[in-house]
Amino acid sequence: MNSIIRLAPLPSPKGTAHQLPSSKSISNRALICHALSGHQSTLHNLSAARDTRLMQALIDSPAETIDVMDAGTTMRFLTAYFAATNQPKIITGTARMKERPIALLVDALRKLGAHIDYLEKEGYPPLHVRGFDRQQSRAISMAGNVSSQYISALMMIGPTLPLGLELTLTGPVASVPYIQMTVELMKAFGVSVYFDRTKVIVEPQSYRPATLTIEADWSAASYWFAMVALSQQAEIRLPHLVLNSWQGDVAIVDIMDRLGVKAQFHSQGALLSKKDHQSTLEWNFVDCPDLAQTVLPVCAAKGVVGRFTGLESLRIKETDRIAALQTELMKIGATLQEETTGVWVLTPAEQAGLPAWSADKPGKLPSSVSIATYHDHRMAMGFAPWACLTEVSIEHPEVVEKSYPGFWEDMKSVGFGLQSH
């Protein structure tokens, strides 16, 4: 794909997002459970996202060196998986992956008895994973406000450990829905898990083969909610999307209800349309941090003042997402500032004393905006909905391959004009 996609303004999108992917989070966990059940399970509707395709390719790879590229989930899950299954591997990734900390997971695995060495910078990939001689401990602890992927990685290997696993989570616990998702998936593969927000207990036991159909991805669906929020009129259908979901990003329904989106659910999926919106929004993203890049651009464009918490983990994602949001939101005069530790205030242009840039004042919009994506799929898709208001150029649009390969085709299908440059 070329390096820029230009989106012509479309105030009233209408149609179906036919290529809405299935859940990457569920798919990646299911692939680990599938492997630990002896590869005897049947998985339907696996995500087509690059991260999931990569997990499929690497989990059974005989290669000594495994390159996870920029896939953080794959790095964390496979580090624990290869250790637990005693497969000697060198695990590496992109330059950005080598900047993403993994010490908390490595420390935990070492306490359990795994042999893992850092090959470059202490605390960061690449790693040399050499497996267990014997399990050294059953009980370990970890801060609860770290990435839930560390916790899930340990949970999923717990049943395979001779002594099992007792994991105590200290302090506030973030992304609880993702931990609960792991619990439910493990149960689907026949494993009993105890989880009470502060402790995970898994006894030694065997995974059993299962048949599982993966539901649609709520993170991917969130961008369509954003388009409806910023449109004059809209009617968007999202197939296979279920409200009763294991995914924490289902919270987008409540958030966007406040930002002007009505969601109706039926057996085939969801129908999104317009409704009135609030002038302010307060939200704690601790359980759904991936939604920040959807919600904050909507607030900035609609003139909604936002007060947000739970954004800490955004610093260690594909990019420093807080810094990236600050830079790109400023292109329409909106500011994102940390008022007190952990409390972020988004001030749209009008409230900041700058020229108004608001969905309610379309006559004052700039004629075009160019968005940098920072090698981050969510930057591309989170800012694309601004095309309901003005011409938007997305730099390096190919980044969407990571989680939603059909995103640009779906934008075309609901009426957006796209030009590649």
Image (cartoon, helix red, strand yellow):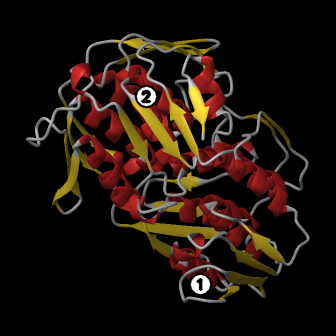
Residue under the point 83% across and 49% down: 208
Q: Nearer the viewer, mark 2 or mark 1?
A: 2
Of the 4 image quadrants, the one containing the C terminus is top right
> Tag 2: residue type?
Ala
Q: Is residue 62 above or below residue 58?
A: below
Q: Position of residue 359 (x, y in %)?
A: 27, 23
Q: Position of residue 25 (x, y in %)?
A: 62, 46
Q: Position of residue 273 (x, y in %)?
A: 42, 12
Residue 282 visible in image: yes
Q: Secondary structure at mark 2?
A: helix
Of the 4 image quadrants, the one containing the N terminus is top right
For label 2, the crowd category at 10 Å Cα-Cα, with few meaning under 14, some 14 to 19 and many 20 or more, is: many
Q: Is residue 101 above or below residue 301?
A: below
For residue 387, the mark is 2
Residue under the point 39% across and 10% down: 233
Q: Nearer the viewer, residue 202 or 111?
A: 111
347 with respect to 378 (left or right) = left
> Tag 1: residue type?
Lys
For label 1, the crowd category at 10 Å Cα-Cα, with few meaning under 14, some 14 to 19 and many 20 or more, is: some
Residue under the point 59% across and 84% down: 111
The quarter of the picture where residue 151 lies is bottom right
20 with respect to 279 (left or right) = right
The residue to which callout 1 is attached is 111
Residue 241 visible in image: no
C-alpha span from label 2 to label 1? 50 Å
